[in-house]
């Protein structure tokens, strides 16, 4: 495969996963706060170590999730390799050593994995969202696959949903209050997409309920957003919509939907969303990124409006928009107390940037100041083209580490790590 065709395939994959629309930028509803002027560089905060096998060619790590899969007390990680159709288990052996285990092959372009005891037998299963074909495609070729754990580190595929628009995200939660885990599924599709919940009727069987037919789904998140003690669903959409929808649950699996945020910039470039109580007031907030590098131009790259923001939960399912800060190519927002000062910070990576400039941001920490302002701290300029991160205490010392996955979308295909662990220096 020549370089041009390789680049085209990579570009098509990210376009299929996270494509925004192609309109001239306008304004954002609930106009953002002024961009952050405070910025620091702290390249010595973390040491980085590559883990897993050396890549053959350019890796396509679409998602990484930290979790103790075998429940041995050591933090592991699950990765989705979209090019080779693999779900990978980075099993920790202790002393900072990891063994890469092929959890499943022929997984139809996996792009997201969540870990949960889906069959409630006491061990952890893996729920995998699969796009099947990574090129823009309107066919109903998506799938949702469970990797059932037998408790002995053997995993069996169970196809829970197939023949639908390409699946981009899924979560497990009891949505109807009957005590078992249902599924919430987001389908990016292309011209068509959907959000649905799948009611667990027992023995790995599910009854599907459509919530909304809309293309461009990026992420679904589940929490009690309106304080009625029932799990609700938030869904982020890209393409021409650039919206976040809330589906409020009455506790019995009946939902009322509304749009809680939207942009009039059809190239806003929504690229990821997570739920966390950012201001620690007891109500779940929404933190989201806009950093997709595709849009009006043929060449993927950063846009001046890329960055991170949060929707402050003001109660009863209402939210206020706040800008966190600018970051070219922002993806994979993670909320944790990075510096252990008692407040919640935000980590993010840059998937699209000016990689010809050796000082372009790759890994960034938005440090939360006590007044809820944020200071942008650049942690690394490389490896470049990171698409996904997570944060967990991998070595059990009480201080969290970062795990990252690389997804190069265009040249240069250098200064990359397929998977890496970032450990905070003890000498600080």
Image (cartoon, helix red, strand yellow):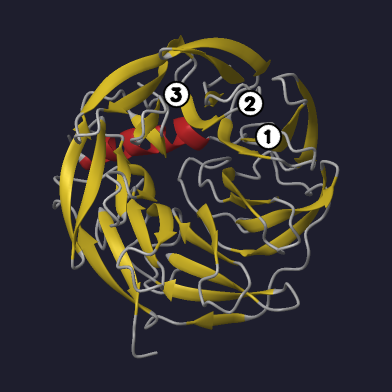
Q: Nearer the viewer, mark 1 or mark 3?
A: 1
Residue picked out by circle 3: 136
Residue 233: quarter of image: top right
Residue occupying image coordinates x 20% and y 58%: 51
Residue 39: quarter of image: bottom right
Q: Nearer the viewer, mark 2 or mark 3?
A: 2
Marks 2 & 1, CB-CB < 8 Å contact? yes
How many circles with numbers are drawn on the protein?
3
Q: Earlier in the sequence, mark 2 or mark 3?
A: 3
Alpha-carbon distance for marks 2 and 3?
Answer: 32 Å
Marks 2 & 3, CB-CB < 8 Å contact? no
Residue picked out by circle 1: 231
Alpha-carbon distance for marks 1 and 3?
Answer: 33 Å
Q: Is residue 261 above or below residue 93?
A: above
Q: Nearer the viewer, residue 130 or 123?
A: 123
Residue picked out by circle 2: 175
Residue occupying image coordinates x 35% and y 32%: 125
**Which SS class for mark 2?**
loop
**Which SS class for mark 3?**
loop
Alpha-carbon distance for marks 2 and 1?
Answer: 6 Å
Q: Is residue 263 above or below residue 166?
A: below
Going by the picture, which residue comes out furthest to the bottom?
427
Determine crowd level at label 1: few under 14, some 14-19, many 20+ residues with C-alpha closer than 10 A.
many
**Which SS class for mark 1?**
loop
Q: Is residue 179 visible?
A: yes
Q: Nearer the viewer, residue 274 or 123?
A: 123
- On the image, the x and y values in percent for residue 171 come to 52, 32
- The answer to whether 140 appears left or right of 84 in the picture is right
Determine crowd level at label 2: few under 14, some 14-19, many 20+ residues with C-alpha closer than 10 A.
many
Q: Is residue 337 above or below residue 67?
A: below
Residue occupying image coordinates x 70% and y 50%: 284
């Amino acid at each position: 495969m020549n370089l041009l065709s390789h680049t085209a395939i990579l570009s098509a994959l990210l376009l299929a996963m996270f494509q925004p629309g192609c309109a001239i930028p306008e304004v954002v509803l609930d106009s953002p706060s002024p961009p952050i002027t405070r910025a620091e560089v702290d390249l010595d905060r973390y040491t980085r170590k590559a883990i897993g096998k050396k890549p053959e060619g350019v890796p396509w790590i679409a998602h990484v999730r930290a979790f103790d899969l075998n429940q041995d007390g050591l933090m592991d990680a699950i990765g989705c390799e979209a090019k080779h159709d693999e779900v990978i288990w980075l099993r920790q052996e202790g002393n900072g050593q990891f063994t890469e285990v092929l959890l499943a092959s022929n997984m139809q372009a996996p792009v997201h994995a969540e870990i949960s005891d889906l069959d409630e037998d006491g061990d952890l299963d893996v729920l995998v969202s699969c796009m099947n074909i990574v090129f823009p495609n309107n066919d109903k070729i998506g799938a949702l696959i469970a990797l059932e754990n037998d408790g002995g580190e053997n995993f069996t595929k169970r196809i829970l949903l197939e023949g639908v628009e390409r699946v981009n995200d899924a979560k497990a939660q009891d949505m109807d209050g009957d005590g078992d885990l249902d599924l919430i599924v987001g389908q990016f599709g292309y011209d068509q997409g959907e959000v649905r919940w799948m009611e667990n009727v027992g023995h790995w069987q599910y009854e599907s309920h459509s919530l909304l037919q809309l293309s461009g789904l990026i992420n679904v998140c589940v929490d009690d957003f309106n304080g009625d003690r029932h799990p609700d669903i938030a869904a982020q959409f890209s393409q021409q919509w650039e919206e976040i929808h809330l589906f409020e649950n009455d506790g019995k699996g009946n939902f009322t939907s509304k749009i809680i945020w939207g942009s009039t910039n059809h190239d806003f470039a929504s690229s990821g969303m997570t739920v966390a109580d950012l201001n620690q007031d007891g109500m779940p907030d929404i933190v989201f990124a806009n950093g997709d590098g595709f849009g009006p131009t043929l060449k993927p790259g950063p846009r001046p409006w890329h960055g991170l923001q949060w929707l402050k939960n003001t109660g009863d399912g209402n939210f206020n928009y706040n800008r966190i800060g600018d970051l070219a190519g922002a993806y994979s927002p993670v909320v944790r107390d990075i510096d252990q000062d008692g407040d919640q910070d935000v980590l993010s990576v840059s998937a699209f940037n000016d990689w010809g400039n050796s000082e372009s941001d790759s890994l960034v920490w938005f440090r939360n100041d006590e007044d809820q302002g944020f200071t942008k701290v650049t942690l690394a300029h490389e490896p470049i083209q990171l698409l996904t991160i997570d944060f967990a205490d991998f070595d059990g010392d009480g201080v969290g580490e970062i795990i990252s996955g690389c997804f190069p979308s265009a040249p240069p295909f250098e200064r990359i790590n397929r998977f890496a662990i970032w450990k905070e220096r003890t000498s600080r």
